[in-house]
Image (spheres, grey):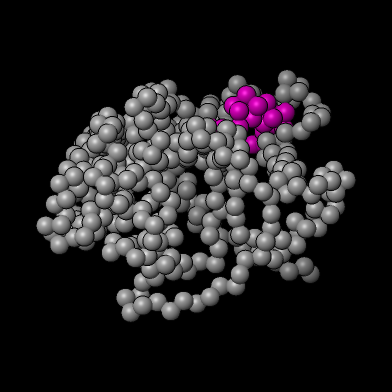
Amino acid sequence: MERTHSLTSLSDDELLRRLSDLLRQSRRCEADLVAHIGEVDSRRLYAREASPSMFAYCTGVLHLSEAEAYLRIAAARASREHPILLEMLGDGRLHLTGVAKLAPRLTLENREALLKRATHKSKRQIEELIAELEPRPDVPALMRRLPARRQVDAPASGLCPVRGAVADRDVEADLPPHGDGVASVAAARPELRPDAVRVPPASGNFRPAAVEPLAPARYKVQFTASAALHDKLERLRALMRSSVPDGDLAAIIDEAVTEKLERLEAQRFARTRAPRKAHSESDTCPRTRQIPAAVRRAVYERDGGRCRYVDEQGRQCTAREGLEFHHRHPFGCGGDHSVENVSLTCRAHNGYLAEVDYGRTAMAVHRRSRKGVVERPSSPAP
């Protein structure tokens, strides 16, 4: 409680500064932790602690989660051959997941160039980098019926060993072989390992869609569709035989998504192939809150369909979702609807800039008043 109170008393600048300092300390500690795991693994000291493997020691003695253990063991083993990985972990240039993804591809020859390109990249960006280095062929377009779900009786512990082995296959595949010849955590028969991962069966009906880069500008997209969606796709395929004779599912979905996207962007940002007037011909006086369509269209094109907020370090927000039109000179203070005065921002930055313009207290009161408004049902017609 005292710690919470001490944090609430900090100014915004001090809170951000302390958070950055704590993150730097955390990264240095993480690099030290990985180095220690690597040394314990190298000396096989896990055996002295009644553990059959380093993975079992990390999960059973250190009480790391399965994913935490996998990533740190992968980083520790890779850092033996490439010590620079610990340095990059310590200063934040590379994260644990990135190390696990890159480790099997690192060599003494490509290390410098590859790690330079991976610096400060997200997991998705590193996967795209790997796809560029090791391009894979396109996957065939297909739709098939999945087998009916079977209920598997769980053991007394309530755990399912088979699903666990499958669920962690991607993480296990990133682990390099053990340097001293001992099999890595990714064994050929994971269900027989003493340190096999066992997780409860999935409770959801569908798994989330998987998007995986295969090669530059090529992606594998996989999802589970309902019977209704499958029927719609088949009907659409039949109707589009003239434009897509081979019935290629990717081409059909591309056309359908493009058409839907054009409709939504026309509604939200007034994008159209044949505009009726230019923004210079529009009335931008602040008589109403309605921003002219030509202005919305010009602002969207100028800002590239992304949030235009830039912080003091020159970093621009990356958001492309939940975009709103923001008046640099507030509309409530007489700001007009000119292209120069309007910009795209995400919802978070639109709210933040409103607090800068009107004050945090005033915006808090405004938000509470909006939440408190209850729409009354209209009176019945006489």
In this view, 7 is above or below 282:
below
Percent across and percent down for residue 101 are 40, 41
Percent across and percent down for residue 123 are 43, 40
Closer to the camera, 76 or 33? 76
User: What residue appears at the point 59 percent right and 27 percent down from the top-left corner?
Assistant: 303
Closer to the camera, 26 or 347? 26
Residue 325 shows in this picture: no
Q: Does 263 sit left or right of 20 as displayed?
A: right
User: What residue appears at the point 17 percent right and 43 percent down from the top-left corner?
Assistant: 39
Magenta residues, start to end? 286-307
Closer to the camera, 163 or 361? 163
Task: Identify the image quadrant of residue 301.
Answer: top right
User: What residue appears at the point 32 percent right and 45 percent down from the top-left corner?
Assistant: 177
Residue 297 colored magenta? yes
User: What residue appears at the point 25 percent right and 31 percent down from the top-left corner?
Assistant: 83
Question: From the image, which quarter does the N terminus lie in?
Answer: bottom left
Residue 230 colored magenta? no
Q: Does 352 sit left or right of 29 as displayed?
A: right
Question: From the image, which quarter does the C terminus lie in?
Answer: bottom right
Percent across and percent down for residue 17 are 26, 32
Q: Does 331 sit left or right of 256 as displayed?
A: left
In this view, 191 is above or below 307:
below
Residue 382 shows in this picture: yes
Percent across and percent down for residue 194 are 28, 64
In this view, 341 is above or below 43:
above
Task: Identify the image quadrant of residue 135.
Answer: top right
